[in-house]
Amino acid sequence: MRDEIKSSCQKRLKRIEGQVRGIADMIAADRYCIDVVTQIAAARAALRRVEEEILRDHVVHCVEHAITSGNKADQRRKIAELMDVVSRAER
């Protein structure tokens, strides 16, 4: 993973960590259920953005490298990995 992507993801994950702690505090304080659910949705969306950023970096480096290498086995493996992770993300 490129350093700038790693740094960006770590910053985002720290913010998400704070969001999750905030959600726990909301539950402890008996906040309105819809407000809690709204914050959970926001945290999930933030995690999806981190996932997309990491996946984009993977495609740009690992998958691109496999394609340009000419190694058919490595190409098939990287494409299979990519399809598997995309399939799981849709669930």
Image (cartoon, rainbow, N blue to C red):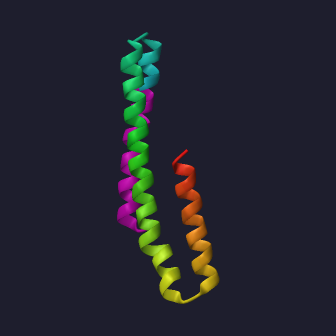
Q: Nearer the viewer, residue 69 or 24?
A: 69
- In magenta, the rendered stretch is 1-22
Q: Write the residue at 38% across / 62% down.
A: 5
Tell me: 67 left or right of 39. Answer: right
Q: Write the residue at 46% across / 78% down.
A: 64
Q: Is residue 31 above or below residue 24?
A: above
Q: Is residue 22 above or below residue 33?
A: below
Q: Write the residue at 43% across / 38% down.
A: 44
- Residue 88 rendering spot, x and y as whole percentages: 57, 51
Q: Quadrant of the C terminus?
A: top right
**What residue occupies the far bottom of the structure in this picture?**
70
Q: Is residue 43 above or below residue 54?
A: above
Q: Nearer the viewer, residue 24 or 37?
A: 37
- Residue 11 rendering spot, x and y as whole percentages: 36, 49
Q: Any magenta on residue 2?
A: yes
Task: Tell me where residue 79 sits by quadrant.
Answer: bottom right
